[in-house]
Amino acid sequence: MEIRLKVNGEWKTIDVSSKETLLQVLREKLHLMGTKEGCGKGECGACTVILDGRPVPSCIVIAATIDGSEVVTVEGLTPNEGLNPIQNGLIEAGGVQCGFCTPGFVVSGTDFFKKKDKFTISELKRALSGNLCRCTGYKKILDGMLIAAKKMGKEIKDE
Amino acid sequence: MNNIFINVNNLNDLLTAKNEYGKKAKILAGGTDLVVRMKNKMMDPEVIISIRKVDELKGIHSKKNDLIIGSLTTHSEIEENSSIKKNYYPLFQAVYSLGSPQIRNLGTIGGNIGNASPSGDTIPPLYIMDAKIKLMSKNGERIVDIKNFFKGPGKTILKDDEIIHSIIIPKGRWTKKISGFYKVGKRNALAIGVVSVAWIIKEDTIRFSFGGVSPTISTTEIKKNANKKKVEKEVLKAISPIDDIRGSKNYRRDVILNIVEKIKNDNP
């Protein structure tokens, strides 16, 4: 069946089968390779995209169910020139090792800071709790997010 | 299998589709359970009815005597509702600790109930708040007590042509001071609860409901001044834990007893 999706600001008409996931559509039909498949069952966060304003695991969203929706992937969060503050923060802090989980973290982190000007560290950690990383031990990812927060003028509140 | 896939856009179309396809059709709401099962080849429904666009089933509404939660309301939307956080605290805590941010953004309360998992996080809070469930079909509607809705793991009284319309909670003031929800799992995010407990204090009694320790949710009431032996007797009468992949029968029993004891001690 045919669906229409607004992907990174641009409307696309895509032919999908009844079982095809949003992740498959993004990678295989729209060739947006930033979004990764990790566990394939909604548990690791590598495939996180923003669907109608909220981060979701695209590997368990059936594309046919979201006709007319708006999707933002990591490509859509990256400026044409250079990188966004979170991507730069992760690089500066050494928060990228194998890099497979990174797009998911960038999406979750960007969404968090988009919605919050003041935040506590535990709120930030909770917003990232659906993203798994098997390399960094998370400390450097968190450091990277905090570097980005500072650059974006966000304020850390006491717990 | 070549599934028939139907997108319905409103409640009437949904009821018509469910009436037509009955048992063959599975309802796809958030998909956090159904899609995972389909991908694992544990399930391959002949007909999939996607209800994502059915606005009549969404949202939280305050009526004179009841709080109504549409079955398609996501866990995130429940978590963000200030009235639920203030006055329906056990439910707030249950959705707060459910899944992960991404899962809470997709998963719905109707799906959590409809799956009828003994570990469904939202169910113990709904039990102690005496919630009712409104079921609907092309031929009418009925309202049932949540306690009569579940028949066993994965089994409910839902008829082939029926859908879960909404959850009705009688108005109450179950605040942080007098109620709560406690879950023990392997880790904080994304772990299915091994056991869960929702509790409410009513004068000299604490009402408990337990998840993960019996085929459906179990409940008991314990006097605040009951001694340890009496508490143990009452709790063990209510539960029938089993060994499974997430924990042993004995572990479940001990954890439940410890949580009950802790809640009792915290609320003298």
Image: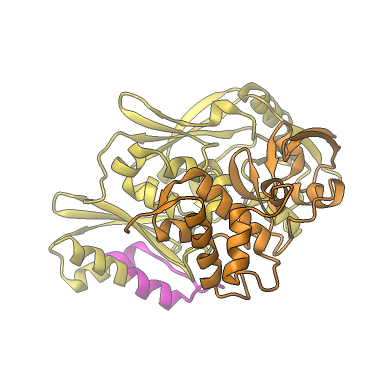
Residue in view at x 32 percent, y 58 percent: A158
In the picture, measured across the screen, residue B243 lies left or right of residue B88, that is right
Q: Is residue A153 magenta?
A: no
In this rendering, does residue B165 appear at all?
yes
In the rendered image, the vertical position of residue B100 relative to residue B66, given as above or below: below
State which chain is coloured yellow. Answer: B
Residue in view at x 30 percent, y 34 percent: B171
Image coords of residue B248 (percent x, y): 48, 76
In the picture, measured across the screen, residue B201 lies left or right of residue B251, that is left
Image coords of residue B231 (percent x, y): 23, 67
In the rendered image, the vertical position of residue B39 relative to residue B88, given as above or below: below
In the picture, measured across the screen, residue B216 lies left or right of residue B6, that is left
Per the rendered image, the range of residues in magenta is B234-256
In the rendered image, the vertical position of residue B254 relative to residue A44, given as above or below: below
Residue in view at x 20 percent, y 64 percent: B266
The tint of chain A in the picture is: orange
Residue in view at x 81 percent, y 47 percent: A25
In this rendering, does residue A105 appear at all?
no
Image coords of residue B206 (percent x, y): 22, 55
Question: Which image quadrant is residue A13 in?
Answer: top right
Image coords of residue B168 (percent x, y): 40, 34
In the picture, measured across the screen, residue B106 lies left or right of residue B230, that is right
Viewer-nearest residue: B145 or B94 = B94
Q: Is residue B245 magenta?
A: yes
